[in-house]
Image (spheres, rainbow, N blue to C red):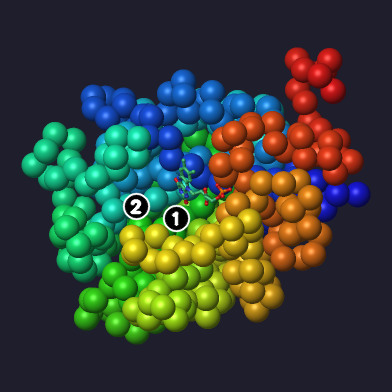
Amino acid sequence: MSALFEPLTLRELTFPNRAWMPPMCQYSAPDEGPDTGVAGDWHLAHQAARAVGGAGLIITEATAVNPEGRISPADLGLWNDRQQDGLARVVAFLRAHGSVPGIQLAHAGRKASTERPWRGGAPIAPDEPYGWRPVAPSPLPFTADGPVPAELTREQIGRIVEDFAAAARRALAAGFQVAEIHGAHGYLLHEFVSPHANRRTDEYGGSFENRIRLSLEVVDAVRAVWPDELPVFYRISATDWLSENPQDGREGWTVPDSVRLAKELLAHGVDLLDVSSGGIAPDARITAGPGYQVPFAAQIKAETDVPVAAVGEITEPRQAEEIIASGQADAVLVGRELLRDPFWPNRAARVLGAEPTWPDQYHRAV
Ligand code: FNR
């Protein structure tokens, strides 16, 4: 029996397997006009292929809760009815084909207003077409020569919390069954928790309790609108790769900080931690390699009992199986390998002696 293909139940939602697709921005929504931020044919085709391929959960890319929270002008958004309707079409397909639909609700903070990666990814200045001034906990640019973000006022912070709740309400109406809050990769919530990006002196900065305040407020706001029977996930950067790197030593967020935050998140109704890392500093030295973030997930799980998903260079069926079977994580997220091969879960099922879930139309492929 394959551990990877054992169902998993969180709250009252059962995932058919533990081979999941993480959020991956497609930068393919219209960047102007009434369909700004609306999911279209590309998003449907992209996710539909992975549903047919057998992914147990598909998490829609970072979806901005307000216009300033987009990484690029071509990001998905979820602040109006058209955006909700566009996503509902994608969700209906996923549910009809046995994949649980999830969505990552996001605010890009100081890393907002950039070009699509294949156009170079550079910041778009506020006075350029399609650009705007990013906001952040403190007026510190992400790159030395990058734009200085505007420091958020407490009123603006309060509105962002409301925007997360409103987007969660829309996500639910669109049919999503998992809401993931993006607390990783140097975007807004991560900027607040990390001493590297947060120099505030009010109740949102300074002590650990103050720096995690916004994360907990967002979790509470999302939990208040998300049904008790459905799970909320939180994506964390387990380490900034700064103070934990002897060759760096700048003050940053650490794995022990993550363990501490995980306990708080659990107490506030988060059901699973999606454990990634990095993203707060462009020059942090990250040691990547196969499964390189799995030990972070395993440590958080061991020290807190929070269910966790592992992500990062998980590409081989037997590698994924071992991560689950050894108890290091409850699920794996397969990113780039699922871009290369949308049928990865069904291929893994064959390798591991589990039953692939081909749709009726493909019955002769079995
Ligand atoms: C990503 N990643 C990412 N992460 C996230 O939290 N929100 C997002 O929207 C995106 N967008 C995104 C786009 C693309 C094209 C890639 C390749 C990656 C990170 C992703 O979810 C995952 O954590 C990493 O890709 C590491 O896993 P793999 O690719 O090594 O399996």
Pointer 1 residue: 182
Q: Please identify the quarter of the rendering in which residue 297 is found.
A: bottom right
Helix, strand, or loop for circle 2? Answer: loop
**What x and y, as percent, mark residue 311?**
60, 55
Identify the residue shown where x is 75% and y is 15%: 361
Residue type highlighted by circle 1: His
Q: Which label belongs to residue 296?
A: none
Viewer-nearest residue: 57 or 14: 57
Q: Is residue 163 left or right of residue 310?
A: left
101 vs 121, left or right, is right
Q: In which quadrant will I find the C terminus? A: top right
The reply to whether dot 2 and dot 1 touch (C-beta < 8 Å) is: yes
> Is residue 273 shown left or right of residue 150?
right
Marked residue nearer the N-terminal end (2 or 1): 2
Disc 2 residue crowd, few under 14, some 14–19, many 20+, Cα 10 Å: many
Depicted 80 relative to depicted 259: above or below:
above
- Percent coordinates x, y for residue 279 in the rendering: 40, 60
Counting from the top left corner in percent of width and height, residue 2 is at: 86, 49
CA distance for labels 2 and 1: 8 Å
Check the image and report above or below for 28 versus 20: above
Q: Which residue is mark 2?
A: 107
Q: Please identify the residue farthest to the bottom as the structure is shown.
A: 207
Query: As shown in the figure, which amino acid type bears the numbered disc 2?
Result: His
